[in-house]
Image (cartoon, helix red, strand yellow):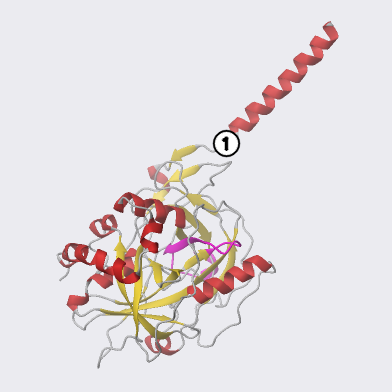
Amino acid sequence: MSRFSHYLSIGAALILGAFIVAFSSRTTVSHVPATATSTISIASSTFPVLPGPVTLHTASTSIDSKNDTGKTRSEQTVPVLAPQKVVTPAPVPTPEPLSTSTPPAAEPVSVPAPLPSSGNVALDASAVALRNALVNIICYVPAGSGLHSISVSGVLIDSNGIILTNAHVAQYFLLADRGVSCTIRSGSPAVSRYSAKLIFISSAWVHANVGVLTEAAPSGTGEYDFALLAINKSVTTAPLPDSFPFVPLATVPPLPGTPVIIASYGAQFLDPTQVQSSLFPTLVFGSVKSVFTFNVNTIDVLALGGSAAAQEGSSGGGVADATGALVGTITTSTVQGATATRSLSAITASYVRADYASETGQALNLLLAESTSTAIANFAPQMPALESVLTAALP
């Protein structure tokens, strides 16, 4: 009996030890120390105002920064991002992207590249869907306005023609009274196809970033930096399609190590003429390197490392996983040096859903269930007040 008790004691100790190890490996949440943060610029592609009549095809980019770093969620620490700050942690060894459609060297891209392959059938199918749902957004500003024309990205997330992009992009749609005009382009190369109306922009972002429109090198973390547009008409002789290609928004964020496809209309290495006639999608296979939170333990930001997608014009581009869901939208990036050495970040689809619900009091799915005409009409009364916030800071 004493021998049995001895074995029983040993077994109990082993079980207790395993429990302690398992418990200690659970996610812990900590705030990022102030000494570990630094400002990072937003990185959209901007281009000069050209002489002559307004041409919606001519543009560059102007706001889209991205940050790369941090710990992970499950089994690791999830740091908290301070407003207008980014974390610069120790480098995390990660494999190089499997392939890209844009060379990493800082040189113009003027010819289309074949869609890359990851060797993963599901991820390759997701890449095709994401490319088909990708759009280029160009906003042209009047000469002498003190603003920058931009060429950026967006992703269709609903068959009715709803586009997810950044707030720092969609703020231009609030300035139609100031002669700002925007068009939606798609294809390879991108050509003008549609016009769109604003159906949501984060009020919190507008109030916190009133100077972004005129700043030479705006900065941020991506917090609140999302907006929704609804395609409302064709700008060609072709009618609107009955259904748009789209990638549905994910409900659960990916963990570090998750393989993803990143797509955007990067334009940093193109001049205005090339943006007009030779702007092709950039597609990169990569993985989630690390994750961050704006709050306590939610996964709100994906760090994606350096790749050809880390360039101006990628703002509003999409990040999809092998299930075919859009898990993130590109918000910030470093834009200096070789693209492989840069850092790219995206806010998660789950963060977009949660913050939309927090600001509006309703689930995002309810907005997507509405007709585009209803969504446009419902948001229109909110636009004058938001416009006045922006215009109060303009020259």
Q: Does the magenta portion include 341?
A: yes
Which x, y percent locates residue 18? Answer: 69, 28
Relative placement, left or right, of 68 versus 238 is right
Residue hosting label 1: 26
Return the x and y of residue 262 as percentages of the image width and height.
Answer: 53, 67
Quadrant location, the N terminus: top right
Q: Residue at x 32, y 64 (%)?
A: 167
Q: Residue at x 51, y 71 (%)?
A: 263
Give the x, y percent position of residue 45.
37, 75
Residue 116 visible (yes or no): yes
- Residue 215 lies in quadrant: bottom left
In the image, taking residue 219 as reference, residue 270 lies left or right, namely right
Q: Nearer the viewer, residue 243 or 204?
A: 243
For this rendering, which residue is in front, 79 or 127?
127
Query: Which span is picked out in magenta?
Result: 320-342
Q: Residue sitting at 54 percent across and 38 percent down?
A: 27
**Rendered image quadrant of residue 3:** top right
**In the drawing, does residue 230 fall left or right of residue 121?**
left
- Give residue 169's position: percent from left, percent from top: 33, 69
Against 298, residue 103 (above or below) is below
Tag 1: amino acid: Arg
Quarter of the rendering occupied by the C terminus = bottom left
Q: Is residue 256 above or below residue 372?
A: above
Q: Image quadrant of residue 55?
A: bottom left
- Residue 217 visible, this orientation: no
Q: Secondary structure at mark 1?
A: loop
Number of on-image labels: 1
Residue 176 belongs to the span the image colors magenta: no
